[in-house]
Image (cartoon, rainbow, N blue to C red):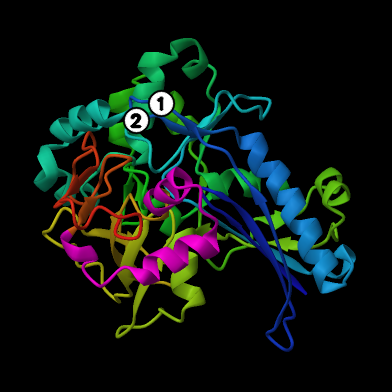
Amino acid sequence: MFLGIDCGTQGTKAIVLDAVSGKVLGEGSGAHHMISGANGRREQDVQEWLDAFEQATAAALQQAGVSGADIQAIGVSGQQHGLVMLDETGQVLRPAKLWCDTESAPENDRLLTYLGGEAGSLERLGIAIAPGYTVSKLLWSKEQFPELFARIDKILLPHDYLNYWLTGRSCSEFGDASGTGYFNVRTRAWDLDILQHIDPSGRLIKALPELLEAHQPVGTILPAIAERLGLNPKAIVSSGGGDNMMGAIGTGNIAPGSITMSLGSSGTVYAFAEAGNVSAQPSVATFCSSSGGWLPLICTMNLTNATSAFRELFALDIGAFNAAVASSPIGAQGVLVLPFLNGERVPALPHATGSILGLDSTNLTQANL
């Protein structure tokens, strides 16, 4: 039996998979809450991730009707770009800044200038750093919370942090590391110079996690965590990866010719490539895949967060919302919504706001909106 975990923006999901039959035997979930601010702040208390991990795992095991002692391995998928900072005791220093956080957009602009603009960033890193990437969050943290910054011992992505919590080992995998803004996707190595530019003391370089190939396991579960979760302490924890990289593997997108579209809190479209041919278009992120190649990807920041906002505005449950959508004609009678509720990455408009266009007295209906 395998346990699969996905730590997303809205919650953590778990599945129990029978490795012999390939069937999903049980599922579970636990919710997360967002810490939001009008300045583009989007953060989460990582303790909620751990609580949701425990809740989702227990529910999945119960639905599957199996014992946690039967779990042989665990794989963790996580939302990309988030920043989790730990001190030398392993304690989290402050809430995690998420992929959809645009509060550090000014810091991103400064770092982009340092790199020589989008063209310089593409030349040096193979990607054009964008608002929401991890690197600008580091500069923001240094300037906004210098005392906490001085205590940094580890800098981790969300899925890295969950693997650290499970095993006590600080590691990252090439695919997820691609979205940090301090990783070279061509050479598959950390870019130390940009971290040295942010903090000449070398603190950030020392705090980097060890890089792993996707096929390399992180280790086994710490006894105390295995007991808390009711899992086999000898269960292997795989490298796991970013949600898009794991989604590519899950949809069989591991060879040229396939395209995956993922519609969640964000919307992504990506395809596998055998060579790391970096696109000249800054909006295309040529991330490393978790299957030995690359994963050119485009990401929009506003998807189900926008639909959820309208659903909550009209106090509709999912069923009623879907029925209202179905009752509106294609084209919504000319009503157009630009759902930039979290700013936007593609196009790069971190301070954009949402708009409703084309309204008149005949098409202003709940269904059209």
Is-magenta flag for residue 26?
no
Q: Classify residue 195 by image quadrant.
A: top left
Q: Secondary structure at mark 1?
A: loop
Q: Which residues are drawn in magenta?
A: 306-334
- Residue designated by label 2: 40
- What residue lies at 72% left-to-right and 81% top-to-bottom? 19
Q: What distance separates the C-alpha of mark 2 from that of mark 1?
A: 6 Å
Taking the image as drawn, is residue 165 in sight? no
Residue under circle 1?
Answer: 37
Residue 342 vs 144, above or below: the answer is below
Q: Quadrant of residue 101?
A: top left
Q: Is residue 73 visible?
A: yes
60 in relation to 222, above or below: below
Classify mark 2: helix, strand or loop: loop
Q: Is residue 181 left or right of residue 167?
A: left
In percent of width and height, residue 25 lies at: 75, 77
Give the image location of residue 137, x and y in percent.
37, 30
